[in-house]
C-alpha cells in the first residue's frame, strides 16, 4: 500500500523541520594603486571561508542584512594619506545575488568604514 504524501511527511517528520537558511558566500577583493591585490572568501551561516575575521565580518553583514551601504564605520583614527583602495564583493547573500563596489581613501579607511569586512 502506497502512502499518501501527507502521511509520508508526518511519519518521517521531515515536513516539520525548518528549512536551513539559504547560503551566503561572497568573494571579497581589494586592489590599491601600488598594485597590491587581496582576495578572500567569506561564507556566513555558519561563518567560514578564508577571511581572517570571518565571525566578525559575518556579524556585521548579518546586522545590515547583507547591505554593504548600511554598514556603520567603527571609531578608529586613520592617516590622511591618500592611497585609494578599490573593493568589491560578489556572490550571494541568503540566496540572493549580491554585488558591491566602492573606493576608500586608503586601507585603514577600508577596514574602518566596513567595520572589518574589508580588513584583510
Image (cartoon, rainbow, N blue to C red):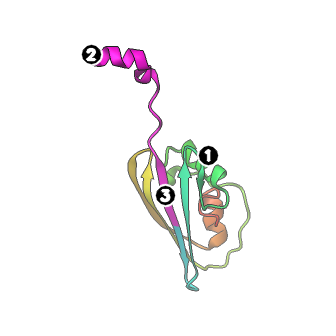
Closer to us: mark 3 or mark 1? 3
Q: Is residue 21 left or right of residue 76?
A: left
Residue drawn 49% across and 57% down? 26
Residue drawn 64% across and 64% down? 119
Residue range corresponding to the magenta coloring = 1-28
Q: Is residue 91 left or right of residue 70?
A: left
Front residue of this view, candidates 51 and 71: 51
Q: Earlier in the sequence, mark 3 or mark 1?
A: 3
Q: CA distance from mark 3 to mark 1?
A: 14 Å
- In the rendered image, the quadrant that contains the N terminus is top left
The residue that disc 3 covers is 26
Local crowd size for mark 3, using a 10 Å CA cut-off: few (<14), some (14–19), many (≥20): many
The residue that disc 1 covers is 59
Q: Position of residue 45 (x, y in %)?
A: 55, 43
Front residue of this view, candidates 56 and 100: 56
Q: Is residue 27 on the magenta stretch?
A: yes
Local crowd size for mark 2, using a 10 Å CA cut-off: few (<14), some (14–19), many (≥20): few
The residue that disc 2 covers is 4
Q: Secondary structure at mark 2?
A: loop
Q: In the displayed structure, would residue 86 be above or below residue 119?
A: below
Q: In the displayed structure, would residue 31 be above or below residue 52?
A: below
Q: Name the outermost residue toward the right.
A: 77
Front residue of this view, candidates 21 and 110: 21
- In the rendered image, the quadrant that contains the C terminus is bottom right
Q: Position of residue 54 (x, y in %)?
A: 63, 54
Q: Earlier in the sequence, mark 2 or mark 3?
A: 2
Q: In the displayed structure, would residue 35 be above or below residue 90?
A: below
Q: CA distance from mark 2 to mark 3?
A: 41 Å
Closer to us: mark 2 or mark 3? 2
Residue 43 is tagged as: none
Amino acid at each position: 500500500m502506497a502512502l499518501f504524501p501527507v502521511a509520508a511527511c508526518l511519519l518521517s517528520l521531515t515536513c516539520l523541520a525548518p528549512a536551513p537558511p539559504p547560503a551566503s558566500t561572497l568573494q571579497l577583493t581589494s586592489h590599491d594603486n601600488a598594485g597590491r591585490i587581496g582576495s578572500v572568501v567569506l561564507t556566513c551561516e555558519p561563518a567560514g571561508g578564508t577571511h581572517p575575521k570571518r565571525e566578525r565580518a559575518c556579524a556585521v553583514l548579518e546586522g545590515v542584512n547583507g547591505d554593504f551601504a548600511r554598514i556603520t564605520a567603527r571609531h578608529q583614527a586613520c592617516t590622511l594619506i591618500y592611497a585609494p583602495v578599490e573593493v568589491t564583493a560578489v556572490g550571494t547573500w541568503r540566496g540572493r545575488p549580491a554585488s558591491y563596489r566602492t573606493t576608500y581613501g586608503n586601507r585603514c579607511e577600508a577596514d574602518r568604514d566596513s567595520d572589518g569586512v574589508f580588513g584583510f
